[in-house]
């Protein structure tokens, strides 16, 4: 990770950590880097979510791009995966999504995508950061070389058509609930499900610039749980602010997480001979219950660091077809380069209709193990993590748990914190082992 950009773009509170000047600078560099630097006029596509500050950042990015001679194509309010899709299929030099995903409205972020619709490479990101820090200069465009903006709402409509084309079945007579989180999916998701014949019930589809993710969407799925039960729906889907993640609710009101979705669709692929390498990709934070369920059906798995970026990299390097995170970032590499919440919900609908089973039955084999996670503030993360006595304590817990649970100790990527997590058959066992390891960290003098 760089000075400004993390695993999911440049994110911070609008005009505090992430300012409109930053956006102008990012636009200035990208317009030059993909344009004049390569002897052409750059084409860049931009999307945004519904935050009030997204409009400010959109205009700031466009200003920077045009000043460097690039043409900025504006998709307006749309989802992250739609920008990734259009960047790739319409031959743009790069794509930009303005969103802070599941964060509150006062935060925002700038996500950068390469011409293939993938997260931009570290080398280019570091060059952008050097420009922001004044280490390099970029010339301005003059006369005929100054760029322009182009209304590109047609790109969003093309993406909607792409989603609809992926459904093998009509959703006729299926009652589907959608929580669009007052975010980027509000102009897309309902239209897709309506076009496929579903009886669509939508909630949190009245964005006002301030209510994105506020007590709604995938981070507050309890409201969709009640909505599904109260309205007698067959299934419900909840998205986050930029709709790159999806969590589901079955007909009984139970939450179906990303781990469940990986199991359900991974097994569906295996049964049809489509699960390349017989593997799914997870992160180290997936629940132990997922791995137990996968073992029972003979599906292998990879474990990456936390972050859909690392999941995608593993999938591309090894040719895997499905992977994701418990939070609902699910990636289908045959169809998308990013997590795509709406696509994920369509894929779940496909399994429900193909197998003629309710979602509760499809998800039942994944029995979540109790989990206790505690954060410990330390003076030096590597010193605490690599302390021989701490490592010995972790090894002893792992040995004691055997195949009935697991322990995970890792450093936070953003705070002076060590995270100690245990999954086991009971909460009491989890608490005992987590507290035991924390006690060793404390006795060795590592606490802040």
Image: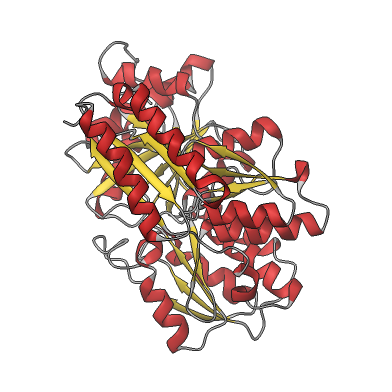
Location of residue 446 with respect to 397 vertically, above or below = above
Q: Position of residue 425 (x, y in %)?
A: 48, 59
Q: Is residue 400 above or below residue 413?
A: below
Q: Is residue 19 above or below residue 135?
A: below
Residue at left 42%, top 54%?
242
User: In front here: 52 or 102?
Assistant: 102
Q: Quadrant of the C terminus?
A: top left
> Quadrant location of residue 139?
top left
- Residue 111 occupies which quadrant of the picture? top left
Q: Position of residue 57 (x, y in %)?
A: 29, 42
Q: Is residue 362 left or right of residue 207?
A: right
Residue in view at x 54 percent, y 52 percent:
404
Q: Residue at x 29, y 34 (%)?
A: 414
Residue 435 seen in this snapshot: yes
Any part of residue 99 in sight: no
Most distant residue in the right direction: 273
Specify whether 307 is left or right of 331: left
Q: Give 123 or 61, whichever is nearer the viewer.
A: 123
Q: Position of residue 108 (x, y in %)?
A: 29, 45
Residue displayed at 51% across by 81% down: 252
């Amino acid at each position: 990770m760089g000075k400004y950009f993390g695993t999911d773009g440049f994110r911070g509170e609008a005009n505090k950590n992430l300012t409109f000047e930053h956006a102008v600078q990012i636009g200035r560099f990208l317009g030059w880097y993909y344009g004049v630097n390569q002897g052409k006029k750059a084409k860049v596509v931009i999307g945004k979510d519904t935050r009030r500050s997204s409009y400010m950042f959109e205009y700031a990015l466009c200003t920077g791009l045009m000043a460097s001679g690039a043409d900025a194509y504006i998709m307006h309010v749309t989802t992250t995966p739609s920008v990734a899709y259009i960047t790739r299929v319409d031959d743009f030099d790069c794509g930009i999504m303005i969103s802070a995903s599941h964060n509150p409205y006062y935060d925002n972020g700038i996500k950068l995508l390469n011409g293939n619709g993938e997260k931009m490479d570290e080398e280019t990101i570091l060059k952008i950061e050097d420009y922001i820090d004044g280490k390099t200069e970029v010339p301005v465009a003059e006369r005929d070389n100054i760029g322009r903006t182009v209304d590109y709402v047609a790109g969003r409509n093309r993406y909607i058509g792409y989603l609809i084309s992926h459904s093998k079945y009509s959703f006729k007579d299926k009652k589907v609930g959608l929580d669009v989180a007052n975010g980027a999916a509000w102009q897309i998701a309902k239209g897709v499900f309506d076009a496929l014949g579903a009886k669509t019930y939508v909630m949190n589809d009245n964005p006002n610039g301030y209510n994105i993710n506020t007590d709604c969407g995938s981070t507050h799925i309890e409201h969709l749980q009640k909505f599904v039960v109260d309205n007698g729906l067959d299934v419900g889907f909840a998205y986050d602010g930029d709709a790159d993640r999806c969590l589901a609710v079955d007909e009984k009101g139970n939450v179906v997480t990303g781990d469940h979705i990986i199991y359900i669709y991974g097994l569906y692929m295996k049964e049809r001979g489509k699960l390349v390498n017989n593997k799914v990709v997870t992160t180290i934070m997936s629940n132990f219950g997922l791995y137990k369920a996968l073992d029972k059906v003979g599906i292998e798995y990879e474990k990456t660091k936390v972050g859909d970026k690392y999941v995608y990299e593993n999938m591309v390097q090894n040719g895997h077809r499905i992977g994701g995170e418990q939070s609902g970032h699910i990636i289908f590499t045959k169809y998308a380069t990013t997590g795509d919440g709406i696509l994920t919900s369509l894929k779940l609908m496909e399994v429900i209709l193909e197998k003629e089973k309710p979602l509760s039955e499809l998800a039942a084999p994944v029995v979540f193990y109790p989990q206790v996670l505690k954060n410990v503030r330390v003076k030096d993360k590597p010193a605490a993590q690599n302390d021989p006595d701490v490592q010995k304590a972790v090894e002893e817990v792992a040995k004691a748990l055997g195949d009935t649970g697991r322990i995970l100790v890792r450093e936070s990527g953003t705070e002076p914190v060590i995270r100690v997590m245990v999954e086991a058959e009971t909460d009491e066992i989890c608490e005992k082992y987590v507290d035991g390891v924390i006690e060793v960290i404390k006795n060795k003098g590592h606490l802040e």
